[in-house]
Amino acid sequence: MKNIHADFQTVATADWEIGAIYAYDIIHNGKQDLSPYRHHTKESLIKQLSRFTLSSDGKTPMTEKGLGAMTTVQLKRILAAINRTNNLVDITKVHATDLPDGDILTYSFPCQDLSIAGNWYHNEGGIDRNAHNRSTLLWQIDRLLNEYEECDKDMPRFLLMENVSEILSKKNIKNFHEWCSILNSMGYENQIYTLDARNFGVPQTRVRTYMLSVLADTPKRQTMVRDYFFGNDLEMVKLPDKAVRTLENYLKLDYSNEDYYEEAVTSTPNFTESRRKIYLNNDKLAIDDRIVGRFAKTITTKQDRNPNSGIVAYEKNPLVSWNRHYRNLTPRECFLLMGFDEEQFDALKNNNFSVRSNKNMLSNAKMIKLAGNSIVVQVLEAIFNQVVEIDQMMG
């Protein structure tokens, strides 16, 4: 929203994963001031944080014992991040009366139980209400909107959903249509988009599904919204390859820069037999300091895997002795390919801190996971531009 010069204020967030909580705060609010927490003891911090359902991995809740294993500084920073972003943490415990008045409600939910990969782990419930998996967090939005109606609270004028395109698959489409019908019954007009980041100028093959729901409570407003989407269909945005920015803007191959060199070395794994397969099977985006690829594949939550988003091969100038063949994308490169800028990544890097010997709050693996779980900024900008235009149109 800031990038498109929209007048906005984020009034609340809801995320339970401590790495994401801290990173979001730093990116949006900058360096923390811990002076308000100087009188806290470790015990008082644990008592405060125990009120929330927090997670260290985004999958399972932390116990009080888990909080106790953290340093006092780590606890202070997590609490400061929660407070600065008005993070309500656990969506299952949030009620409409807890939410400040707002015009836009954005929501997503873990995609693992929706995706094709989810079937490998027998996560076959999809978004069925009774599936008892993390993807059913979708229905918490249904609960919240019903609470809005019950307490006569003004409904959000816009809803924005993002998820993997498998939400439209045969397995999930019935439940997704049910969700769309519920929104229709509440007065929302839904526009569903399946968009590739490449069509918004980013050299990453990343296809995701979005639904923008607009509250249109009169026949006239319904017609206005439908006509707008008919004439402004983002799925019709198709950039020619030459109009997409090149990977030169994203891959950091100038190793005279100490940060880029250090990050590249850290992203060079030992060359084991499984890494040999990664080297042979994945796209080479660059060789030494020369760009040879056109697009990265989807940035996922891991790069040291097969398949991955692409590799940087070593030919004449290997950086390390333990692997003279390739490196993975660095956390910085992953963030850039998601549309963040270097200033934002450097803010994370400069405000990272040690939680124990040889371990930071945001490890390289954690930062890559955060990038893989995020949404391409330029795609969001295009959708939020539509929100601004519809808002102006409807007066």
Image (spheres, rainbow, N blue to C red):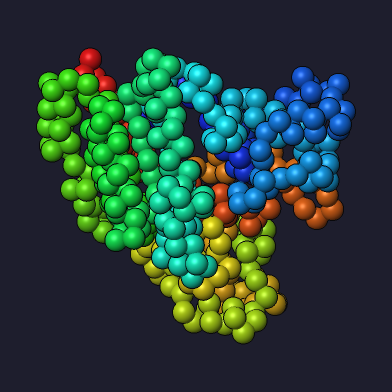
Q: Nearer the viewer, residue 65 or 163?
A: 65
Q: Residue 75, percent across and down?
A: 77, 35
Task: Please say if 3 is above or below 394.
Answer: below
In which quadrant of the rendered view does residue 233 lie?
top left
User: Horizontal placement of 75 versus 141: left or right?
Assistant: right
Instruction: Work out whether residue 243 can be spotted.
Output: yes
Q: Residue 287, percent across and down?
A: 49, 72
Q: Residue 141, percent across and down?
A: 43, 35
Task: Please say if 366 is above or below 41.
Answer: below
**In the current view of this chain or complex, which residue is farthest to the front?**
130
User: Horizontal placement of 190 versus 357: left or right?
Assistant: left
User: Where, quadrant-wise, is the N terminus in this rendering?
Assistant: top left
User: Horizontal placement of 296 versus 13: left or right?
Assistant: left
Q: Nearer the viewer, residue 300 or 163?
A: 163
Q: Residue at x 59, y 29 (%)?
A: 87
Q: Residue at x 57, y 74 (%)?
A: 326
Q: Nearer the viewer, residue 236 or 119?
A: 119
User: Where, quadrant-wise, is the C terminus in this rendering?
Assistant: top left
